[in-house]
Amino acid sequence: MKILIGTNNRAKTKAVQSISSIYYPKASFENKDVPSLVSNQPMSNEETRQGAINRAKQLMENSEATFGIGLEGGVNEMNDTMYICNWGALATSDGKIFTATGAGIPIPEEIAIQLKAGAELGPVMDVYTNKNDIRHDEGAIGVFTDGFVKRSDMFEHIMLLLIGQYELSKKLS
Ligand SMILES: O=P(O)(O)OP(=O)(O)OP(=O)(O)OC[C@H]1O[C@@H](n2cnc3c(O)ncnc32)[C@H](O)[C@@H]1O
Ligand SMILES: [Mg+2]
């Protein structure tokens, strides 16, 4: 079986490969950097979810793969607090779409202000931590949980939620 991954991000790729390999040990993987077709920095749950769905759907256009995975990070404001949000979508060869959302934690006000002014979380986090490419490693969630939950851990959980729904649908059909 073949699994398509809609990104070149290393944290996302690691999550898709590590979880899929447990359940589908013979799976092969291919990365395709499909566009999310939403803002570079999604600013709501709705927009972030749509980005994940758009990526998953595009992967399966003219493809013989078993399924395609779109993973998208964004932020969502609730009662004056900005939370990191994360969404995933699994699109199947027969046109089904499964979605799942991941963990969320608040981000500091000084970062929220910059995102509202149009900045992207990735570069803002690099300046904040004085590191490069945080988004490929522990991510903002890793920084703000003192490394307890890394960006790949969070997307691994989303992968379990997606594969679980997909496997249930196969049993029921
Ligand atoms: O190559 P793609 O798949 O687009 O990966 P990405 O890292 O850009 O990830 P998203 O598009 O899903 O995320 C939207 C924006 O939020 C940033 N971002 C999201 N989650 C983050 C995290 O945990 N740590 C740092 N930046 C994050 C990211 O760099 C983008 O600017
Ligand atoms: Mg991006």
Image: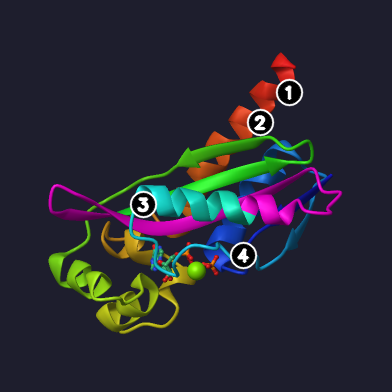
| Magenta residues, start to end | 56-83
Q: Which amino acid does label 3 sit on?
A: Cys
Q: In which quarter of the image is residue 30?
A: bottom right
Q: Residue tagged by mark 4? A: 7
Q: Residue tagged by mark 2? A: 166
Q: Are marks 1 and 2 in contact (CB under 8 Å)?
A: yes
Using residue 92 as the reference point, say whether residue 45 is left or right of it.
Answer: left
Q: Which amino acid does label 1 sit on?
A: Lys
Comparing 117 with 136, the one in front is 117
**Element under label 2?**
helix
Question: Disc 3 or 2, which lies upstream in sequence?
Answer: 3
Q: Are marks 4 and 3 in contact (CB under 8 Å)?
A: no
**Element under label 3?**
strand
Mark 1 to mark 2 CA distance (whole Å): 6 Å
For residue 173, above or below residue 72: above
Name the residue: 42% across, 54% down. 47
Which quadrant: the C terminus? top right
Q: Residue tagged by mark 1? A: 170
Give x and y (percent) for residue 74: 38, 59
Which quadrant: the N terminus? top right
Q: Find residue 85 and name its label.
A: 3
- The answer to whether the beta carbon of the residue marked 4 is less than 8 Å from any atom of ligand 1 is yes
Name the residue: 68% across, 35% down. 96
| Label 1 crowd (10 A; few <14 / some 14-19 / many >=20) | few
| Label 3 crowd (10 A; few <14 / some 14-19 / many >=20) | many
Give x and y (percent) for residue 5: 67, 57
Mark 2 to mark 4 CA distance (whole Å): 21 Å
Instruction: Give yes or no for residue 48 being in the magenta stretch.
Output: no
Q: Which amino acid does label 4 sit on?
A: Thr
